[in-house]
Amino acid sequence: MAAGRLPRARGRPRPGPRGRHCDGALLGTVALLVGLTGLSAFQARTHPTLVWAAFALPAFGGALATIGLILMAVVGDRPVAGIYGWGLLIIGVIATFAGSVLFAIATYRTAALPRSGAVILGITAAISLVSFVVASGMDGPAQPIVVAGLAAFALGWVVLGLQAIRLHRPAVQLGAA
């Protein structure tokens, strides 16, 4: 039996993907939700309704994607109460990308964080959304398109997060002790 594979029981489908890809996706989704919460708090004082609406869509998408990944890891391609893990994952990923574009727009409008980071996030989230949709319609190997889109998406959030950290770092004072 190959390493990392579960034995197949008779009459039962093998559980879905388990390994570095699934673990990395879960970790990335949880990190995005934590970061999204913190960055939303920066902006909530200025336009609370807009900011929390922009928080809700990617947070909901991230939660759906996480549930979808867990379902795929536990039961594979079998439905649970008529719901497939892949379906939740795909809807969650699309909602996360679209919500990130909305979050970038809210960030740009509130100007609570640097607008350059909001523009980068908006562009990279849009690229990710388009790459995901294009790759899902391809018959051949679409992995490079998806990986490039996910890398762009991560880059957009990292840039915005780093700008938020730099914006609120205490000033260093030089002087005699």
Image: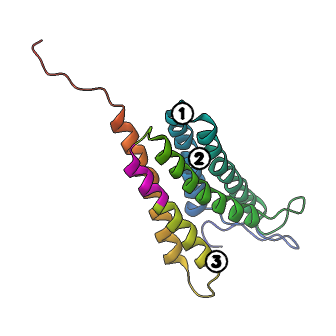
On residue 30, the disc is: 2
The amino acid pointed to by label 2 is: Val
Across and down, in percent, residue 142 comes to: 55, 80
Residue situated in front as seen by the camera: 111 or 131: 111
- Earlier sequence position, callout 2 versus callout 3: 2
On residue 136, the disc is: 3
The answer for how far apart the CA atoms under marks 1 and 3 are is 34 Å
Residue situated in front as seen by the camera: 15 or 157: 157
State the SS at label 2.
Answer: helix
Which residue shows up at 59% across the image and 87% down it?
140
Across and down, in percent, residue 78 comes to: 83, 67
Give left or right: position of 107 versus 88: left
Residue situated in front as seen by the camera: 101 or 31: 101
Task: Magenta stretch: give its range.
Answer: 114-122
170 in magenta: no
On residue 41, the disc is: 1
Which residue shows up at 56% across the image and 71% down it?
130
State the SS at label 3.
Answer: helix
Give left or right: position of 95 versus 71: left
Farthest top residue in view: 177
- Earlier sequence position, callout 2 versus callout 1: 2
Q: Is residue 19 visible?
A: yes
Which residue shows up at 73% across the image and 66% down it?
86
The amino acid pointed to by label 1 is: Ala
